[in-house]
């Protein structure tokens, strides 16, 4: 089976990857509707490091004194 072009072009996000949050994908998500209306700017500026992945989610740590967070992989993009 051939891969779709979008899957082949997107780099795999794995443990140790540096990422930032895609603003459009995050704002349409369930996570955004369950959180404070104003997401902090560091989410979208990056970089955040992927500490772990489990299913469709990744645990992120930012270089700031803030707690680690879990977000869906489809909301992340390479930094």
Image (spheres, rainbow, N blue to C red):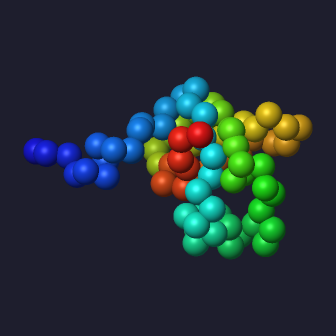
Does residue 2 appear in this view?
yes
Q: Where does residue 64 sit, x and y in percent of width and height?
A: 85, 37
Tell me if 8 is positioned left or right of 57 in this view: left
Tell me if 59 is positioned left or right of 77 in this view: right
Say which residue appears at 70% left-offset and 43% top-offset.
Answer: 46
Residue 23 lies, with reference to residue 49, above or below; the image says below
Locate the C terminus and report the quarter of the image it occupies: top right
Quarter of the image for residue 37 reads: bottom right
Q: Residue furthest left?
A: 1
Q: Where does residue 60 sit, x and y in percent of width and height?
A: 67, 40
Q: Where does residue 41 sit, x and y in percent of width and height?
A: 78, 55
Tell me if 19 is positioned left or right of 44 in this view: left
Q: Residue furthest top?
A: 16
Total of numbered circles in the picture?
A: 0
Q: Where does residue 44 sit, x and y in percent of width and height?
A: 69, 53
Locate the N terminus and report the quarter of the image it occupies: top left
Say which residue appears at 53% left-offset and 41% top-offset.
Answer: 78
Say which residue appears at 68% left-offset and 38% top-offset.
Answer: 48
Residue 8 lies, with reference to residue 27, above or below; the image says above
Does residue 57 appear in this view?
no
């Amino acid at each position: 089976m051939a891969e779709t072009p979008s899957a082949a072009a997107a780099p795999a996000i794995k443990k140790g990857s540096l990422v930032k949050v895609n603003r459009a994908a995050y704002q349409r998500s369930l996570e955004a509707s369950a959180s404070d209306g104003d997401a902090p700017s560091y989410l979208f500026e990056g970089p955040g490091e992927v500490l772990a992945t489990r299913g469709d989610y990744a645990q992120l740590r930012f270089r700031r004194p803030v707690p680690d967070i879990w977000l869906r992989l489809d909301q992340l993009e390479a930094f």
